[in-house]
Image (cartoon, rainbow, N blue to C red):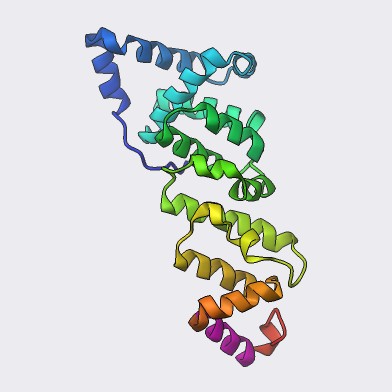
Amino acid sequence: MKTAGHRALPSSSVSSRTTRSPMNAPNQILQKTLMALHRDASEVHRLWHDKARLLPLLECALAIQAGQPGRTALGQSAAYLLNYVLVFFAGTAEGLGALLRSLPRADLRATLANQWLSNELIALAEVSALARSQDVWTLEHLSAEDTEWLARLSAQYLLRHALPNSLSVQLLVPEELRLGPHAREYLLGWAYEEGKLDPAATQYFAQAHPAKFAMLQTLAAAHPSAATRPL
């Protein structure tokens, strides 16, 4: 599963240190609890209603996933808890936002968002809603790659459902995502090719990215039967 790329101690290193240092005893207990919860849906469901127990376990699972544990028993247990919580309790943008606000560490919030985006059971409609929500501001550690991935998934949903000539710049390229010029150009060009940009967005695209706009016009003129919008 795709992760946000934050590095953590391998599980073997964590295990060896927890046996020598009492300071890490709580972490060792959390890891054992995670493994006991693996594929125990009823217990995880009950755990959702006990946030005092859930949040430390969730933080532990996120730290393990950020360390890219592979198919270790601990890694699989962490992935199970995260997948169950994300699909059954945080499958909406609103649900994810509430969970993000409960996590104090910015790096773990970014990992959680990455896991959410990676889960194909999360509807594109909810991904698009997240891209346009204020909860995006809690993701200051989200990588540029994941931010652009979020924007592309959102655009995919919008282009699939939007009427011709209906998408505004703000809807397609939310300011909250703070996308760079290349990502903005890509999304606007994609929407222009699909014939979904509204007149103001088309004018903005032509002014902000004249080379790309001219190239797409040339291609459309050369292949009129394949063009998706009239010139």
**Can residue 193 be seen in the rendering of this structure?**
no
Looking at the image, residue 84 sits to the left or right of residue 181; the answer is right
Looking at the image, residue 59 sits to the left or right of residue 83; the answer is left
- Exactly how many numbered labels are in the figure? 0
| Residue 150 forms part of the magenta stretch | no
Q: For the point 51% across and 20% down, which residue is it?
A: 55
**The C terminus lies in which quarter of the figure?**
bottom right
Identify whether 30 is placed above or below 189: above
Looking at this view, name the residue that lies furthest to the left.
20
Residue 77 versus residue 177: which sits nearer the camera? 177
Identify whether 20 is placed above or below 207: above
Looking at this view, name the residue that lies furthest to the top.
22
Q: For the point 54% across and 44% down, which residue is it?
A: 136
Q: In terms of secondary structure, what is the magenta stretch mainly?
A: helix
In percent of width and height, residue 156 lies at: 63, 59
Looking at this view, name the residue that lies furthest to the bottom.
222
Residue 99 versus residue 9: which sits nearer the camera? 99
Instruction: Choose top left, top right, bottom left or bottom right for residue 32.
Output: top left
**Can residue 56 be seen in the rendering of this structure?**
yes
Which residues make up the magenta segment? 212-222
Identify whether 83 is placed above or below 36: below
Looking at the image, residue 15 sits to the left or right of residue 2; the answer is left
In percent of width and height, residue 56 lies at: 46, 18
In percent of width and height, residue 151 lies at: 55, 56
Identify whether 104 is placed above or below 135: above
In percent of width and height, residue 114 lies at: 49, 42
Q: For the point 64% across and 72% down, which residue is it?
A: 201
